[in-house]
Image: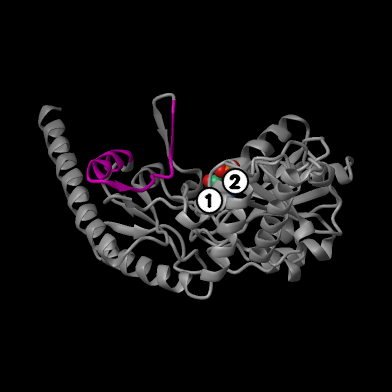
Amino acid sequence: MSGLLYFDHNATTPIDPRVRDAMLPWLEDGFGNPSSVYSLGRRAASALQTAREQVAALVGADPGEIIFNSCGTEATNTAILSALAIDPDRRHIITSSVEHSATIKLCEHLATRGYEITWLPVEKDGTLDEERLLAAITADTAVISLLWANNETGILFPVEKIARIAGEKRIPLHLDAVQAAGKVPINLSSLNAQYVSLSAHKLYAPKGVGALYVNRRARYTPLFRGSQEEGRRGGTQNVASIAAFGKAAELALEALPEAPARLGALRDGFERTLLALDGVRRNGAQEPRLPNTSNLSFEGVEAETALLLFDQEGLCCSAGSACSSGSVNPSHVLTAMGLSRDEARASLRFSLGKTITEADIDRALEIIPRVVSKLRAERSDGALVRTAVS
Ligand code: PLP
């Protein structure tokens, strides 16, 4: 990536050249519609089948349990609405206060339609206590929808325990595995989850393609009506991107025995160096966490300003906050973990990826402390000036 220090892989990933190669034939001579009966169409249909097998293998599912769609957000919306359709009399949804906007925005909307939402709190270290889930379940609970891995902190929720509770209470469970897939092992064949969201662009494949796992015994209602995906998701499939998704899943599965340990070691060294600086602390537990993610708060630093200075030096990371109508909102994930608004605004997320080298880490570790010191010095100058004036 020509010298770019890309430390924002939880936002999206670059396309792996092998993934691009797997995609190109379907943009060129293999342009057929997979629903067409002639051989051009049948070739496209067989590309979809290969990709379905590859994605299924990554998460330990049957290929028939994978429904391709446009993104992780679509998968999550479809899953939750599908679960709600099972028993329309049940009007209670359990989710958490640290979910991705795909879940939050849908649940907020459903709240305006008469659904009751329980937003489970997380502990100070970002973990979820499954006893809180147990306590929140009522006879009216229609669905439990929770993250597998948090996109901002990397914290992993106790999905096995969650699935056991949901199974015992016979409540449909949706897990958002968009950040987890490819970063940690997933075996859905031994987990009692009815629906699981996946997205290709976190896996070195293009944006705008995702999948929903629907357990073969789960009740399911499509969001888009049409004949494709066996009537489970209407709309002509994006064959090239789905082929890319499949290849990316295959590569991720091949890398799983070693890649997490390598990334974890790089991340831990990176984090140790930064935590040794004054006024730096980690947001979230050391474990259980995705191996690539480090969310740190830098006392006295405005994260949004730091991002701009990092950008000038070719370093990309994320502030985990949303800028809307001129005001910078602190991350809802970090405030849910008990950080003050100022602490949350001083937080940066670094998310590593497979092309990052030790040399990249060294360069980033030269830039970050320098920018942090500069911002703190400017701030204390500003504070002194203000004190002198007032
Ligand atoms: N869920 C999580 C945890 C995510 O991190 C993201 C993307 O950032 C999504 C869902 C949405 O996926 P997509 O961008 O494919 O809609």
Q: Residue at x 28, y 62 (%)?
A: 361
Left or right of 270 on screen, residue 70: right
**Where on the picture, by quarter, is residue 294?**
bottom left
**Where on the picture, by quarter, is residue 377?**
top left
Are the residues at dot 2 and dot 1 in contact (C-beta closer than 8 Å)? yes
What kind of element bears circle 2? helix
Amino acid tagged 2 = Ser
Q: Is residue 98 visible?
A: no
Count of residue discs = 2
Task: Give the percent coordinates (x, y) of residue 11.
Answer: 46, 47
Instruction: Identify the residue under disc 2.
Output: 241
Q: Work out how far the residue at label 2 is from the one at label 1, CA to CA, in angstroms.
A: 8 Å
Instruction: Identify the residue under disc 1.
Output: 205
Residue 227 numbered mark, or none: none
Q: Residue at x 86, y 59 (%)?
A: 217
The answer to whether residue 276 is above or below residue 220 is below
Task: Give the percent coordinates (x, y) of residue 234.
Answer: 78, 37
What kind of element bears circle 1? loop
Task: Give the percent coordinates (x, y) of residue 16.
Answer: 46, 55
Is label 1 within 8 A of ligand 1 (CB to nearest ligand atom)? no
Graded by Cα atoms within 10 Å as few (under 14), some (14 to 19) or many (20 or more), the crowding at tag 2 reads many
Q: Earlier in the sequence, mark 2 or mark 1?
A: 1
Q: What stretch of residues is rendered in magenta?
A: 304-324
**Where on the picture, by quarter, is residue 61?**
bottom right
